[in-house]
Amino acid sequence: MAKVTRKLVTEIIFFSSILIIVNLIFDYVEMKKLIQSTYDEFLAQISMTASSYFDADKIDKYISEGDESTEYKDAFDHLHMLTQTMNASFIYLIKPDLPDCGEKTYVFNTVNNNLLNKYHPYPAGFREKSSDSSAQRYKKIMEQGIPIVDYDYFSHVGARARISMPVKNSSGETVAIVCVEHKLDDISRILHRYVRADMIYGPIAGIFFVILISFFLSRHFIRPIIDITKETDSFISQNAHFSGKLQEIHTKDEIETLARAIYKMGIDLQEYIKNLMQITSEKERISVELAVATGIQDGMLPKNFSPYQEHPEVELFASMVPAKEVGGDFYDFFFSDSHTLWLVIGDVSGKGIPAAMFMVVSKALIKNYAMQKFSPGEVLTRTNAQLSTENPQGLFVTTWIARIDLETGEMIFSNAGHNAPIIYNDGKLTFLREVSGIMLAALDNTQYKEHKVQLAKYSGLFIYTDGVTEATDTDHQLFGEEQLFNVISKFPENTEITSRVLIEKVSSEIEKFKKGAAQFDDITMLSFMLKELDDSGNTKTRVFDADDKYLDEVLAFAKSSVKTELSPETDNKIDLAVEEIFVNIAHYAYKDGNGKVKIVSQLKDNPERLCIEFSDQGVPFNPLEKPDPDITLSAEERNIGGLGIFLTKKFMDKVEYRFENGSNILYIEKKL
C-alpha cells in the first residue's frame, strides 16, 4: 500500500475515530441536556401538585398529630396516589433543622408500591441525620428559597432524577422542603444503548469511509451525522420539535436506524410531555373543584346536635355519607323562634359537583322562606317557583319539610316527592304516607299540600333519603322499607334511646346488609325525638347525671318555668332546697356513683306556685322519715346531718316523698 494511501487511511481512521468520539460525547451531552430540561419541568409539575395537597402553615401540626388527624390522612392519600400515578419513586416532605440542616424531620413520606420491598415510608415525626451534601443542599434551599434539581445516572439503585422544592407558608417563609425522586431507567437505557451503538457502528462506518473515501464519507456518514447533530440541537432549542431532516436520512444502515430511533424517541417524548401536562392540569382542576364543593357542602350541613340547653325535650341527630367526593343529599334543622323547630331533608337528582351546587341553592332558599314565617307548604311552593325559573341542567330535588311547635306538639309538614318518613306517636310506629306533591324544580306553578300531626310525649321521626332503602348487597338486593321498619321497630319502647344511637344502629345494619358492596347513592338520615311537651311553657323536664358538678345547671333549670322575677328571699330558699335534694342524690343514691336524676319544673296558677319533682332509681330512701334536729342545742351538741332536709321542709310549702315503679320521687312546692 502506498505511503499516501496508508497516510490517508491512517488519517481517515484517526479523524474518523476522533469524529466518532466527539459525536458520541456531543450527542450524549445533548441527550442529557434534553432529558434534564424535560425532567426539570416534569419534576417541578409533580412537586407543585404535591405542595397543593397540604397546608404549609400546618407543618408542625402534621408532625405532632400524624395519622391521628383526618386532614393528615387525606393529604397523605393524595400524595400516595400522586406517587403511583406519576410513577415516582418517592415523594416526601421534610423539615430540616436550622441553621445547619444537619438533621431533618419527616412530615410525609410516600413510596411507590413497586419499591415497598426495598423501602419503607417513614412516619410523621421521624428524625434522621442528613449527609453533608444533603445538608448543604437543604441549607441553600431554606436560605435562598429556590428549587434544586440533580441527576445521578450511576447510583447503586440506577439512574434517577430528584427535585428539592422549597415550601413556603402564607407569610412567604420557607418552612419545609418537598422532594420528588423519579427513576430514569428507560431513558438511561436508551442513552446507554445509543452510546454503545455509536461505539460499535462508528468504527464500521470508518471502514466504509476508508473504502469509499470521500463519496461514502460525505454522503453516507458525515452529512447524516451532522444532520442528526443539528436535529438534536434543534429539538432542544425549539421546545422539543424536529425540523423534518431526520426523516430525509436514507442511508439504509445503522445511521438511518439511529435517526429513526432519535426521531421516534423525540415524538414519544413530545406526546408523553403533552399527556403529562394534560393529566396534571386536569387533576389539579378536579381536585380544586372537589375541594371547593366538599367544603361548601360540609359547611352547609348543621353539626350542633342535641342536647340543647334551652330545649332539653328535643333529641336530634343526623348524618350524610356521600357516594362520591360530594353528594346531592342534604338535611337541615333550625329554630325560627324560641319554640318552633323546622326539620328538612332533600335529595337532588344526579351526583357530583352540579348536584352539590343545586343542593346549596335549594337548602338556602328553603331556610330563607322558613325564617320568614311561611308555612311548610308555602315554603315548598315558593322554593319550587324560584328553582324552576333558571334550571338549565334540568335538575330537581325531592324534599320533606316539617314545622314543629314544641309547646303544643303540633307538627305541620309537606312533601315534595320524597320518601315517607317513619313516625312513632301514641305508641304506634308507622310510615307517614300522606299525599305527596311533585319534586321541586320539576314543574312550575305547583302548589304543595300541608298535613298536620299532633305529637305526643316520647314521639319520634326518622327521616331519610332513598340511599337508605336502595342500598344494595353483592347480589343486587335492596335493603328496602320493610327491613328499615324492622330495625327501627326495636327501639320505640326504650325511652332512653337517643337519636344518635338510632342512626348508628341503622347505619350498622346497612353495612352488614351490603356485605362489602359499593355504595352507589348518598345515604342521609335525620332522627328527631320529642322527650317531653312544654305544656305552653309551664312545665319543663330534663334528665341530669347524678353528679354535683351539674349543680349550677340544676339550680337554673329548676326555676326555668318561672316567668316573673323572684324576690331574693324566695330565690335563696328555692336554691337551698334544690341544692340539698340534688347533692344528696348525687352522693348517696347510687352505690357506684353513676346514675341519672330526672327533674320536672312546673309553674301552677291560683295561687301561683313553683312545683319541682326529683326522681332517681337509686337506693330506696325517704329523707322525711329522719327526725328533725334539735336546733335549740349548740352545734357541738347536735348530731351531724339532717339540717338540710329540715330547712327544706321549713322553707317549702309542701314536701312529699313516694317510692313508685322502682324510683325515689321527692316533690317540693313553693308559693311565689
Image (cartoon, rainbow, N blue to C red):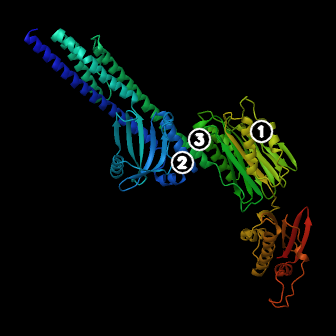
Query: Which quarter of the picture shows residue 51?
Result: top left
Q: Which residue is more in the foreground, 382 or 480?
A: 480
Nearer to us of marks 1 and 3 is 3
Image quarter hosting the N terminus: top left
Mark 3 or 2: the one toward you: 2
How far is the residue under mark 3 from the one under mark 2?
27 Å
Tag 3: Cα neighbours inside 10 Å, few (<14), some, or many (≥20)?
some
Provide the residue designation for mark 3: 357
Front label number (1 vs 2): 2
| Residue 447 rendering spot, x and y as whole percentages | 73, 40
In the rendered structure, which disc, 3 or 2, sits on the residue that comes first in sequence? Answer: 2
What amino acid is labelled 3 in the image?
A: Met
**Amino acid type of the residue tagged 1 in the rendering:** Ser
Residue topped by disc 1: 436
Tell me the number on the disc at residue 72. Answer: 2
Alpha carbon distance from label 1 to label 3? 25 Å
**Quadrant housing residue 472:** top right
Say which element carries label 3. helix
Q: Is residue 445 above or below residue 226?
A: below
Residue placed most toward the observer, 273 or 599: 273
Residue 36 appears left or right of 330? left
Task: Where is residue 624? Give x, y as percent.
Answer: 89, 76
Q: Mark 2 falls on what kind of element?
A: helix
> Above or below — where is 247 with respect to 546?
above
Q: Quadrant of residue 465?
A: top right
